[in-house]
Each structure stands twice: as C-alpha cells, then as structure tokens.
Image (cartoon, rainbow, N blue to C red):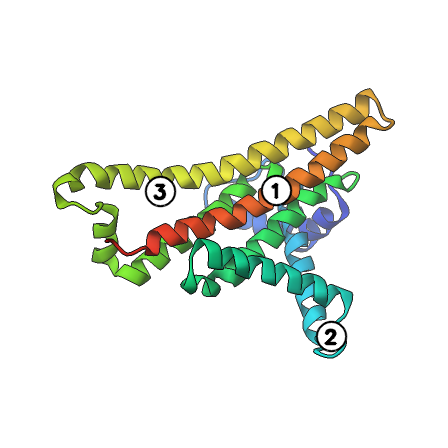
Amino acid sequence: MEHSFWFATLLNKLFGGAVTLLLVKLGLPPIHPSHPIPNYVAEEVLVGLIIVVGALILRSSLSVEKPGKFQLLMELVVEFTQNMADEVVGEGGRPYVALVGTLGIFIALCNLMGLIPTLDSPTAHGAVPLGCAVVVFAHYNYQGIRHHGLLGYLKHLCGPMLAIAILMFPVEVFSNVLRLLSLSVRLWANMLVGGMLENISTNLIPIALPAIFMALHAFESLLQAYIFMILPLLYISLATAEEH
C-alpha cells in the first residue's frame, strides 16, 4: 500500500468505512478496505477545500478602496480569463469565465502540489484529468444543445451540407470523443513524466539539478492549466457557432 499522507489518513478515518461499503455495493471492492481513499483523491479534495477557503477569505476581505494583495492577484486571474474568453468565444464568452477560471486554478494547484515533498500531483493519476475532461465534455455539449436545441445540435454535428451528413456525423462524434481523451491524456502524461523526471534527478544528483527540474515542473504545471482553460473555450465556441 502506498504511503498515506496525513490528510488521506484523516479522510479514511472519517469516511473510509462508508466509502468501502459503497464500493462493495457497487461491485468495486477496494484493494485495501481500511484505506479505500487513495492519496491522489485526498490531494484533490484538499485542493478543492483550499479553493473554497480561499474564496471565503477573499469574499470577506473584498475592498474597492484598499484591495489586498490576494484580491489584486485574483483580479488579475479573472481579467486574464475574461480576456481569453472574449478572444476565443467572442461577445458571449463571459458566462463561461467562472467554470474555466475555476478549472484553471484547480488544475494549477493540483499540478503544483507535486513540488511539495512527500506529495504527488493528483493530476499525474489518470482518473483526475479524466474527471476534469468529463466535466468539460459534458459542459460544452450541454451549451451546444442549449444554444441550438437538441435537434439543432445534432444537425450542427452533421455539417453545413445535408448531402455529406452521413459522413460528417460519425466523424464529428468521433472528434468529440477524441477531445475527451486528448484533454485527459495530455494533462496526465505531462504531469506523470514531469514528476518522474524530478524524482530521478533528485535520486541521481541531489544538488542543483533537482532545482532545474522543479522549475520546469512549475512551468509545465502552469502551462497545462492554461491549455485546460483555452481548449474548453474553443470547444464551447465550436459547439455554439452558427452555421453560415
């Protein structure tokens, strides 16, 4: 069994029995019944709690006249996300800022967690990127249906010409499924390899070289979070686009 860090131990102590019972009823008994919540799940739960606590702190200290450093930082993040939405989606991009911004912050923090000794990036485990990708997949398809209507969205997937609809529809469906895999695999592979290189460098040459790989890990963490923000906006733009 993997070494359990303190928050995973706490979650298993509080909810382990209920989680094990649920998994058994679903026909998915955990390998370790006393430890059904793995570290990567506990780590992403911890990140989620950090975001919630940060939001509550920010809300309680908001000020127009004397904004604090944390407020100024978050205003930069919001402005950055708004500009990205305006550029990719256009005038109708602002409603998607909350989702995309939250995803970006969540993934960035999950990625950067791997820089903390004894912890790993939860995004280096395939289930976490896949879960984020499923959220994006469901959301942009929902927005497409909401914008066009169900029949209109299906027609949208058939392409601009009825004559080639029988060819275009399966291609578009396959393309949508491929987006789901692309989003999850890209993030998972980059964070997995980044963590492995950092661990190898630390074991081989524990002086200076690990710092270089840690800097690369930090850069890759922010880059992957950015990609996971811009691609959903692109998919929403394509799903809600009007045919001409």
Left or right, residue 209 beside residue 36: right
Category of crowding for the residue at label 2, using alpha-carbon neighbours closer than 10 angstroms: few (below 14), some (14–19), many (at least 20):
few
Closer to us: 90 or 114: 90
Q: Residue 216 occupies which quadrant of the picture?
A: top right
Q: Earlier in the sequence, mark 1 or mark 3?
A: 3
For the residue labelled by badge 1, is the local secondary structure a helix, a strand or a loop? helix
Closer to us: 64 or 87: 87
Residue pictured at 51% horizontal, 59% vertical: 99
What residue does disc 3 label?
176
Residue pictured at 80% horizontal, 30% vertical: 210
What residue does disc 2 label?
61
For the residue labelled by badge 2, is the local secondary structure a helix, a strand or a loop? loop
Q: Earlier in the sequence, mark 2 or mark 3?
A: 2
Up the image or down, 210 lies above or below 50; here it is above
Residue 75 in percent (x, y) is at 65, 65
Q: Which mark is residue 137?
A: none
Residue pictured at 68% horizontal, 53% vertical: 46
What residue does disc 1 label?
223
| Residue at the right extreme, as displayed | 207
Q: Residue 68 occupies which quadrant of the picture?
A: bottom right
For the residue labelled by badge 3, is the local secondary structure a helix, a strand or a loop? helix
Left or right, residue 1 beside residue 207: left
Q: Hey, what amino acid is under mark 1?
A: Leu
Q: CA distance from mark 2 to mark 3?
A: 42 Å
Do the residues under discs 2 and 1 have CB atoms within 8 angstroms?
no
Residue pictured at 52% horizontal, 35% vertical: 186
